Image: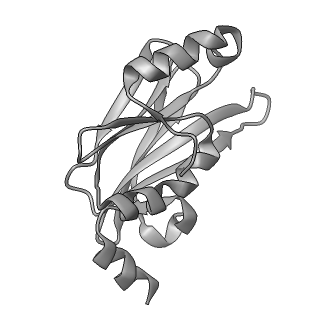
Amino acid sequence: MSNYIFGFDNWKKFYLQNKQENKKKTWIFFQTSDDKEVYLKEYNEWLTIQDYIDKKSLKIISVGLRHKTNKIVVDTSIADAVYLVRSVKGEFGAVTRQCFTIGKINGNKVEKTMWLTPELIEESSYTDHIDACFPEAVVYNDKEKRKAKSI
């Protein structure tokens, strides 16, 4: 298992240990069906979540982003799968912005919302097809549906 941080109190302790560095971060967190809140130190840890969910037979019931005291939470309790990807948004003559896109997957439909960081401002929301997602960024709540997608 990775170096996940379990629970808000443990996250807060970790955050305060190196506050200068940690206050610059946008944190990913999620709530599992066994009522645990899990914080990730780095985006790459999201790519290990499927194994964690499968080994513990859990579901992700919500996923969120936190920057300092600002946070957003997305309810994923009835989603087949959860999608989370990091990206950048650029425009000619403008500053390039870091973003996270969170998606709820049901069937082949993905409801995506892009969040600008660090402010956690909603940039856009749209519905996409699952084929437009990076497969490694999808975490399935149901092992059977994940197996069906890989056939």
Q: Is residue 134 visible?
A: no
- Residue appearing at x 54%, y 56% in the figure: 48
Q: On the image, which quarter does residue 16 sit in?
A: top right
Along the horizontal axis of the image, is 126 left or right of 120?
left
From this view, report whether residue 109 is shown above or below residue 35.
below
Query: What is the x, y in percent for residue 71?
Result: 41, 22
- Residue appearing at x 57%, y 47% in the figure: 2
Along the horizontal axis of the image, is 16 left or right of 144?
right
Q: On the image, which quarter does residue 87 sit in?
A: top right
- Residue closest to the far left: 78
From this view, report whether residue 147 is shown above or below residue 2.
below
**Front-most of 2 and 59?**
2
Report the quarter where the C terminus lies.
bottom left
Q: Is residue 7 visible?
A: yes
Query: What is the x, y in percent for residue 141?
Result: 31, 62
Query: What is the x, y in percent for residue 51?
Result: 47, 62
Q: How many marks?
A: 0
**Front-most of 59 and 79?**
59
Query: What is the x, y in percent for residue 27?
Result: 53, 29
- Residue appearing at x 40%, y 18% in the figure: 9
